[in-house]
Image (spheres, rainbow, N blue to C red):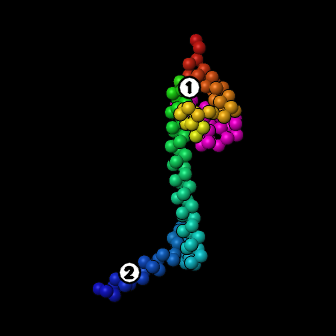
Amino acid sequence: MERTVRLVRLLVLAMAFFTISKQRPLHLLSAFDLARENELLHEEIEQLKRAVASHAVIDQAIGVLVAIGRIAPEEAWRALRDVSQRTNTRLRTVAEHVLDFAQGGALPEPEMLELERAFQRYRKCSHPTD
C-alpha cells in the first residue's frame, strides 16, 4: 500500500513537468518553462481581475448616464463609448470621471462637452419628434 502511494505521488510530480496540448500531448517542460508558464498564468489572472473591475465601473457609469441623461441603457453605453473615442480617453477613465461627477466632482471640460452632445444625439433617437 505504501509503495502504491509513493508511486502515485511520483507520478503526480512527474506529470507536473509535462504540458498537455493537442499539438504536443506530453511535452517535457524545463524548470524555466514551468516558471514562465506559472508567470503567464498569474498575469492572466491579474488581467481578468482588472477586466472584472473595469466592467463594474463601466456598468455603474452607464447607470449614472441613464439617470442624468434620461436615455436608455443602450444609448448610455453608446454615449460613454462616444465620449471615450471623441476625447481619446480610455473608456474606464471616462467611466471613473462620470462616477466622480455623480458624486459632486468635476467632469473634464472635453468630456462634458462630448457628453452633452451625446445626450442630444441619443435623446433624439429615443424620442423622435412626430
Q: Could you tell me how far apart the alpha carbons at marks 2 and 1 are, in whole angstroms?
A: 63 Å
Query: Can you give x and y, in whole percent of width and height, for residue 97 in the image?
Result: 60, 37
Query: Can you give x and y, in whole percent of width and height, for residue 60 in the image?
Result: 51, 37
Residue 120 to residue 32: above or below: above
As drawn, which residue projects farthest toward the front?
A: 104
| Type of amino acid at the residue the image marks with label 2 | Val
Query: Can you give x and y, in whole percent of width and height, for residue 35 in the image?
Result: 56, 72
What is the number of callouts on the image?
A: 2
Does the image show residue 33?
yes
User: What element does badge 2 sit on?
Assistant: helix
* Foreground: disc 2 or disc 1: 1
Q: Sort mark 1 into few (<14), some (14-19) or many (20+) by Cα contacts within 10 Å.
A: some
Span colored in magenta: 71-94
User: Is residue 18 rendered to the left or right of residue 121?
Assistant: left
Q: Which residue is mark 2?
A: 8
Residue 112 to residue 59: above or below: above
Q: Which mark is residue 104?
A: none
Assign the magenta stretch its main secondary structure.
helix
As drawn, which residue projects farthest toward the top?
A: 130
| Type of amino acid at the residue the image marks with label 1 | Gly
| Residue 57 included in the magenta stretch of the image | no
Residue at image point 56% right, 19% down: 127
Q: Sort mark 2 into few (<14), some (14-19) or many (20+) by Cα contacts within 10 Å.
A: few
Ranked by sequence position, the earlier of labels 2 and 1 is: 2
Q: Which mark is residue 69?
A: 1
Quadrant in which the N terminus is drawn: bottom left
Q: Quadrant of residue 125?
A: top right
22 or 44: nearer the viewer = 44
Residue at image point 70% right, 40% down: 88
Residue 104 to residue 55: above or below: above
Query: Can you give x and y, in whole percent of width and height, for residue 130 in the image?
Result: 58, 12
105 or 125: nearer the viewer = 105
